Amino acid sequence: EYNGSSWTGGGAMTFAGRDFYGGGVGTLTAALQVGGFISPGNLSSTMQHYNGTAWTNIPQTFPNAPLTGGMASCGTQTACLSTGGPPDSTNSQSWDGSSWTSAGSLTIGRSGHSQRGTQTAANILSGHPASPPTYSTEILTWDGSSWSTSSSTLSTGRAQAAGFGAAAAAAVASGADGTPNYTNTSEIFTEAAVATKTLTIS
C-alpha cells in the first residue's frame, strides 16, 4: 500500500502464486480483483474484495475465466468495466456490485491493453488486436452505451504498457512494441471537448 510517501505491506491475497492481470479496480480501502493467471496455464474466474486490511473471496465470478489473463478493467469495487482478453476478444462486461452484464462489443478486439475511466466513460489505449508482434495504435472510447473507434491514434503501437489518467485525459508509457527491445516512449490522449453553440432567435 502507498500513502503518498512510502510503501507498506498490505493484507495477503487469498491465493498464492497468482499473476493478476487486468482485473484490479477501486481504491486503497475498497478494491476489487477479478480472476488471474495461475501457472502453468490455469485462468481463474474468482473475484475478491479488499477493505484496506484483508482480501475476501466473494460468491460471484467473472463469466469467462480465459479472458482474465489479458483483459483490462476500470471503475470501482461496485461499478467496474472489464474488456478484451486473449487473444483478441471484443468482450465487454459491466459489474454493478452483484452481477455482470454485457456492455456491448469492442469495435476492435484487444488484449494486453490499458483502460482508464469509469463504468460510464472510458477509453482503451494500446494492446494487441492479435498475437504479437501486431500492436495496436487504435484508441477506443466508451460513452456508457457503446464503444467507438476514436479518430485519434497512438504514434507507437504497444501492448502491456503502463497507463494512467481518466476517460478524456489519459496516457500510456513504455510497453512492448514488437521489436526485440521494449519502447520507452509515452503518449497522451486528450478527447476533444464537445463544442457548445448558442442559438439566438429573434
Image (cartoon, rainbow, N blue to C red):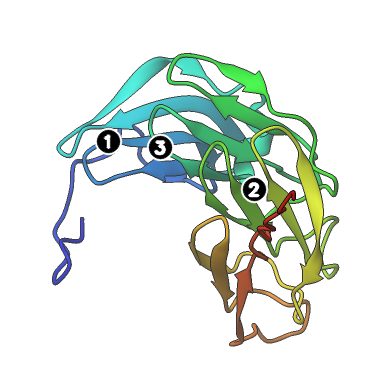
Q: Is mark 2 on a helix, strand or loop?
A: loop
- Determine whether label 3 and label 1 are within 8 Å by CB: yes
Position of residue 78 in the picture relative to residue 171 (left or right): left
Q: Quick check: 149 above or below 46?
A: below
Crowding near pointer 2: few (<14 within 10 Å), some, many (20+)? many
Q: Visible in this render: residue 167? A: yes
Q: Residue 76 carries which label?
A: 3
How far is the residue under mark 2 from the one under mark 3?
19 Å
Position of residue 61 in the picture relative to residue 84 (left or right): left
Q: Quick check: 13 above or below 109?
A: above
Q: Residue 30 carries which label?
A: 1
**173 vs 134, nearest the viewer:** 173
Label 1 is placed on what type of residue?
Ala
Locate residue 174: give its quadrant: bottom right
Q: Residue 70 carries which label?
A: 2
Crowding near pointer 1: few (<14 within 10 Å), some, many (20+)? some
Which residue shows up at 48% across the image and 25% down it? 46
Q: Visible in this render: residue 87? A: no
